[in-house]
């Protein structure tokens, strides 16, 4: 697991949120049903192993990011979830905002 350095977008936060929502919608339409299924499964596993304030799926051009905002491990099962993600080849990153699982798209 690696840690990302993120920065606050300040006064441009609203515009950044609108742009991210637009890109997310456009990229989801190009995903295969298998990619969407893997992202939903990853979100469910994160919900099982971690307590978080919110779960998001963000569709990007080359990967799908599943984010658990404010993720805190529930129990030892959280380690098993992280290990499973790494065995599947998913990139797991810890940020100041939470936990992000990146799934490389097949399409």
Image: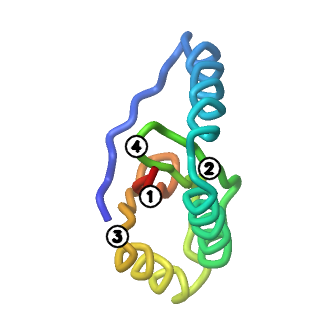
Where residue 13 appears, x then y in whole percent?
58, 18
What is the secondary structure assignment of the residue under circle 2? strand
Work out whether residue 43 or residue 60 is closer to the camera in this orientation and state it. Answer: 60
- Label 4 belongs to which residue? 62
Residue 57 shows which numbered tag?
2
Give the crowd class for mark 2: few <14, some 14-19, many >=20 residues within 10 Å: many
Where residue 76 appears, x then y in whole percent?
52, 89
- Label 3 belongs to which residue? 89
Q: Are marks 4 and 1 in contact (CB under 8 Å)?
A: no
Q: What separation in Å lies between label 3 and label 2 (alpha carbons)?
A: 18 Å
- In the picture, measured across the screen, residue 27 lies left or right of residue 94, that is right
Q: Are marks 3 and 2 in contact (CB under 8 Å)?
A: no
Residue under the point 60% across and 78% down: 49
Q: What separation in Å lies between label 4 and label 2 (alpha carbons)?
A: 14 Å
Residue under the point 43% across and 48% down: 63
Residue 30 shows which numbered tag?
none
Where residue 31 appears, x then y in whole percent?
56, 47
Q: Earlier in the sequence, mark 1 or mark 3?
A: 3
Q: Quadrant of the N terminus?
A: bottom left
Where residue 55 appears, x then y in whole percent?
67, 55
Give the crowd class for mark 1: few <14, some 14-19, many >=20 residues within 10 Å: many
- Label 1 belongs to which residue? 103
- Whether 6 is drawn above or below 80: the answer is above
Q: Earlier in the sequence, mark 2 or mark 1?
A: 2
Q: Earlier in the sequence, mark 3 or mark 4?
A: 4
Q: What separation in Å lies between label 1 and label 3 (alpha carbons)?
A: 8 Å
Work out whether residue 33 or residue 94 is closer to the camera in this orientation and state it. Answer: 33
Give the crowd class for mark 4: few <14, some 14-19, many >=20 residues within 10 Å: some
What is the secondary structure assignment of the residue under circle 3? loop
Q: What separation in Å lies between label 4 and label 1 (alpha carbons)?
A: 9 Å
Which mark is nearer the camera, 4 or 2? 4
């Amino acid at each position: 697991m690696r840690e990302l350095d993120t920065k606050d977008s300040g006064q441009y936060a609203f515009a950044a949120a609108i742009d991210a929502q637009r890109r997310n919608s456009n990229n989801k339409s190009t995903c295969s049903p298998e990619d969407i299924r893997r992202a939903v499964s990853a979100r469910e596993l994160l919900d099982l192993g971690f307590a978080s304030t919110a779960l998001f799926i963000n569709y990007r051009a080359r990967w799908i990011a599943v984010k658990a905002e404010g993720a805190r491990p529930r129990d030892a099962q959280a380690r098993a979830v992280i290990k499973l993600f790494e065995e599947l080849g998913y990139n797991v990153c810890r940020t100041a905002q939470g936990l992000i699982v990146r799934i490389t798209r097949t399409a």
